[in-house]
Amino acid sequence: MNIHAARVAVAGIAGMAMLVPGTAPVWAAVDDVTVTGVVRLDGVPTAGIEVCDLFDSTDCMLTDSGGTYTVTPKLTTDNQFGVDVEVRCVSVSATDTHEGLYKDIRYGEQCQVKIDAEPGDTVQRDLEVNSYPVASGQIVDVAGKPVAGATIKSGYRPVSLTDAQGRFSVRMGPYPYDEHSLHVSADGYESMGQKWSPDGDLGRIVLPRAGVTDQFSVSGRVVDVQGRPYAGVTVCIEAGPCIGTTKADGYYFGLFTRSSVSDAEKLQLKVPGKSAPVNITRDYLGFQSTLATHVDFELDSARRIVSVKPKIHGTAKVGARLTVRAGSWLPQPVATTCRWYVGSKVVKRNCSPLKVKASYRGKRIQVTVTGSRAGYASKTVASRRTARVR
């Protein structure tokens, strides 16, 4: 890797400062300072990482099998924001052996690894670096169907495509000032982008159809105080549209209209079993992007099972057989039990079909289904009553 790449990856804007006319460093003739230490990549001493005098590409070495390096950075007069300062700087960069390195560099630090020492000193300086973060997720349309072949771009790195399930995994960076961003595009859809993309799973990213320029993607998760997923919670903007409902894994996703929200927006969580919504104010659009991920919420109430009303199938007449469809219950697995009622009397305590007897004539039939799961409050829902048995 050349020295310019090293400056971008590790020394923040120092590399760019070198390209600005009138800011080139002036070498000072002084005795050398020896800097030695170990470079740890993601906490592990690593071979094959290049360590250099930031302003002298001829003074470089690759770390050995134990991650050890030695360089002799010279004292340099460097113009930092219009002020001449004398500094010794060490840079760290990736080689072809590694996919890339980054450090926590922000605007305003030209010499990120600064060495303070007297001429002739030997300084021990261990360096901690990290791999570029990996972002993964799934690209879907407004109906939640995967978008295959979508383009995922991260800075200057090679473009990736989503697979048949719309999933992707891409290593972020490098960028000026160590910013990380993601850009998603696909034929027939509007593009989405995000700066300062977090590491890890970004969940589902929704692409609106082409021409819909006022809707942007948002996704996140709802959990209880113990970090367990909370299914069936609908996330809405107060006095505005609802974004989406959490699935069995606690994740929700959907689109929001930028014109309907502010940087500090009050959201409403419609929780199963609660008559009133839970209001939460979140600063979740405080960055310029068209997609927001990891907009997560924690609820202090007990998790509840989510269900739909069961349905009775068949004709309520003597001799017929009635069946019950319990419908979907979240989060799976949920154990269900049934009770069949003829009038107000329980005539059967399981979910198997009910044969209509002559004694049921003139009465209505109903079934209740109770769902239970460890760690959740059980829930019982009732079907609609049939017509009177004839």
Image: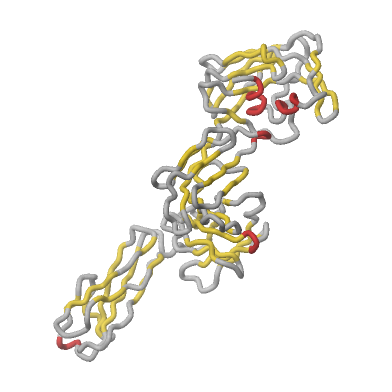
- Furthest residue to the right? 83
Identify the residue shown where x is 46% and y is 52%: 140
Q: Quadrant of residue 347?
A: bottom left
Vertical placement of 157 versus 140: above or below?
A: above
Question: Which image quarter holds the C terminus?
Answer: bottom left
Above or below 184: residue 25: above
Q: Quadrant of the N terminus?
A: top right
From this view, report whether residue 295 is shown above or below residue 197: below
Name the spot of residue 306 as percent of width and height, x first. 41, 66
| Number of numbered markers | 0
- Residue 2 lies left or right of residue 82; in this view the side is left
Residue at left offset 55%, top offset 65%: 236
Q: Nearer the viewer, residue 189 or 184?
A: 189
Colour mapping: secondary structure
Relative side of 71 to 84, left or right? left
- Measured as percent of width and height from the top left, residue 387 is found at 27, 86
Whole-percent x and y of residue 317? 19, 85
Nearer the observer, 252 or 231 = 252
Relative to 198, is 121 above or below? above
What percent of the width, then of the height, locates residue 30?
A: 80, 9
- Depth check, front residue: 173 or 251: 173
Residue that lies at the very extreme toward the bottom in this rendered image: 362
